[in-house]
Image (spheres, rainbow, N blue to C red):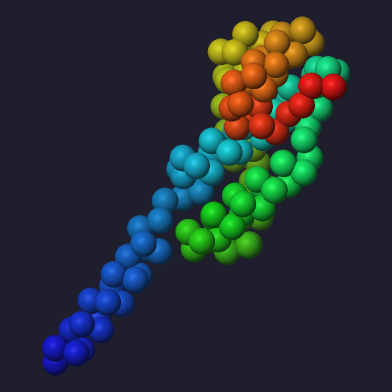
């Protein structure tokens, strides 16, 4: 009986984290990483003086994928999350708020460049994904 109880308790401990996992949209690390990518992408698209460090973007993307898989998510769940219109809209709203807080004005390329240069100088996660041309 003691062995059976130990086995049941052990299984419960092992299953606990998988059952208690937060949704992808609530995971702070995943959201901060996706926000950094979204902000960086917008900056590089609006500022001709800044480009993406594609190898770094790819490497950090694979690391984020591994992180999510280690949390117990499946590849299908990750694909569904990334393709979700609701999640894309949520991330776009977060991105736009971040850009606005950073002094970016839509249509003003210089404001995107200024924020991009600041992100690079601060070595923020967004800055690590970007380079000055």
Q: In x, y percent, where is residue 114?
A: 70, 10
Which one is in front, 125 or 45?
125
Instruction: State whether residue 55 appears in this view.
Output: yes
Please tell me which residue is depicted at 65% across the width and 45% down the height of the picture.
Answer: 60
Q: In x, y percent, where is residue 107?
A: 78, 10
Instruction: State whether residue 92 appears in this view.
Output: no
Relative to 60, say whether 121 is above or below.
Answer: above
| Quadrant hosting residue 69 | bottom right
| Quadrant hosting residue 110 | top right
Please tell me which residue is depicted at 35% across the width and 70% down the height of the picture.
Answer: 15
Please tell me which residue is depicted at 61% across the width and 38% down the height of the picture.
Answer: 34
Relative to 23, say whether 1 is above or below.
Answer: below
Query: Could you tell me which quadrant the N terminus lies in?
Result: bottom left
Q: In x, y percent, where is residue 71?
A: 48, 59
Residue 12 falls left or right of residue 127: left
The residue lying furthest to the bottom in this view is 1
Query: Could you tell me which quadrant the C terminus lies in?
Result: top right
Which one is in front, 105 or 131?
131
Please tell me which residue is depicted at 64% across the width and 37% down the height of the picture.
Answer: 88
Q: In x, y percent, where is residue 48?
A: 85, 18
Residue 44 falls left or right of residue 122: right
Relative to 133, say whether 14 is above or below.
Answer: below
Q: How many marks?
A: 0
| Quadrant hosting residue 109 | top right
């Amino acid at each position: 009986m003691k062995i059976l109880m130990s086995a049941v308790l052990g299984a419960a401990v092992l299953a606990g984290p998988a059952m208690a996992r937060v949704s992808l949209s609530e995971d702070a690390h995943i959201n901060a990483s996706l926000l950094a990518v979204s902000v960086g992408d917008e900056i590089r698209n609006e500022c001709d003086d800044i480009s993406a460090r594609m190898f770094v973007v790819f490497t950090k993307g694979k690391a984020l994928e591994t992180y999510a898989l280690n949390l117990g998510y499946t590849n299908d769940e990750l694909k569904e999350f990334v393709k979700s219109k609701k999640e894309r809209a949520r991330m776009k709203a977060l991105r736009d708020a971040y850009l606005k807080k950073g002094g970016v004005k839509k249509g003003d390329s210089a404001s995107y460049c200024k924020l991009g240069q600041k992100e690079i100088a601060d070595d923020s996660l967004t800055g690590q994904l970007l380079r000055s041309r």
